[in-house]
Image: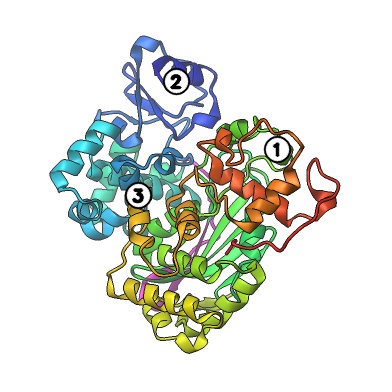
Amino acid sequence: MDFWQRYRAIDARDPRFDGQFYTAVRTTGIYCRPSCPARTPKASNVTFYETSAAAHDAGYRACKRCLPEAVPGTPAWNVRQDIAGRAMRLINDGVINRDGVEGLAARLGYSPRQLNRILTQELGAGPLSLARAGRAQTARTLLVSTPMKLADIAFAAGFNSVRQFNDTIAEVFGMTPTALRGTAPLHGAGTHRKDGGSSTSLVLSLPYREPFDPGIFSFLAVRAIPGIEEGTPTSYARTLRLPHGDARFRVEYDDGARGRPLTLTVGAVDLRDLPALLSRIRRLFDLDADPAAIDAVLAADSRLAPSVAQAPGMRMPGALDPQELLVRAMVGQQITVAAARTALTQLAAAGSPSSTPGDGLDRLFPAPAEIAAAGHLLRGPRRRTESLLQAAAAMASGRLDFGYGNDLPGLTAALLPLPGVGPWTVGYVAMRVLGAPDIFLANDAAVRNGVRALDNGEHAFSPDFREASPWRSYATMHLWRAAARPPAARPGKTSVTTIPAKGMP
């Protein structure tokens, strides 16, 4: 967007752009979200920034009226596969908190100085400033949503000291942490301490851009592994291994609730892992997406238009753990969802018990080393079993290393040489780990079935759905849903011959 497109967006107070850019006003010294209800400033006094960190570095503080830190993140970090996008995915996952700027730069293949120059040029702020803005956002969320102690919030948000926390909150928001807490009623259910004070339970609301289609809960539910995951059409819960320990959480959807209908309950988590957990849950549910922009493009294809009208705001499920997602993809190749779930349930016996059991969830998904030693638990063709064991051994040894910081060429180079891994597996992992928005799995059986289900007899559109670019991953989600519906429930269709849905682990 150029300056005047952004200016028109703030003049219209359009909430679709909240989190996608920030408006700084020279005469007031504050920055706002695009939908801020305050009077539209003169264009001559406005500067737009890509990130809140850039506004901080330029000397602006957050608006107390519109709270620009309380918005969904930008969808650009998934659309952009450049260094800036890759860096932001890793920063959001807490890499700087754990490994510093040097660790972030090493993952991206740059020196710290080069990385700082690139991010400052592209995003208006260096990696430390971007990480600091993320800490401030996490801290604000915890301050206004929970009764956690201030010291606990400081370390949960990633600050190294309470003093650093106090100084940042004062600089960014223009008030003390106690005053900021007083700006909103408490929505949390309180906290309780476990494991010598290292684990915390809390309840938060999850912001997102409307509309939101809850079908993602059903997608996750039919793939849920007993003891590790539990899903319904309106909820999803699971255990998860994180850098400092394991966690347990539940996300629930209530479209009849006032305000935010998405509620996150963290059953237990090491405070140091909280920013990474929140980031990964947002990725899992694709909460930073811009559904209005996506649906507008998809609806221009007459094959997809009825499905988009029936399910606006469809989300693309992300991945809580990149290595786990590769295992699930390899197990699920060329078999039905139900068969993949059965195989993964057998494999789950190799996983370690959770240190924070509850809600019927008592195990963790097996780590690569555990899978590599669990050949006796695997069923199916020998070649697939051997391929999976080799991939698990490579991940366990560190020879195979990939994650949120990859781009599509890098992910392809890492995965495609593996025995048993083909273009479908790479594409599926790219969709869910990177959030790559323009993947079309043309050879997927369920995709082909979905195309037949939505075929309206028009042949003006390309078979690879290139008209839906750059959102073909979301087109794939619509096709998968169409394939899973009974004929009478498919939009625009009354009957169709179906085949078993495969390739959807």
Percent x, y of residue 240: 46, 69
Q: Is mark 3 in CB contact (under 8 Å) with mark 2?
A: no
Mark 2 residue type:
Arg
Say what secondary structure mark 1 lies in.
Answer: loop
Percent x, y of residue 252: 63, 57
Label ID, residue 409: 3
Between the residue at mark 3 and the residue at mark 1, the CA separation in whole angstroms equals 30 Å
Label ID, residue 303: 1
Between the residue at mark 1 and the residue at mark 2, the CA separation in whole angstroms equals 32 Å
How many other residues sit within 10 Å of disc 3, few (<14), some (14-19) or many (≥20)? few
Q: Is residue 104 magenta?
A: no
Q: How is the image coloured?
A: rainbow
Quadrant location of the C terminus in the rendered image: bottom right
Mark 1 residue type:
Arg
Q: Is residue 343 visible?
A: yes
Q: Taking 332 as reference, is 168 above or below it?
A: above
Task: Give the mark toward the camera: 3 or 2.
Answer: 3
Left or right position of 247 against 105: right
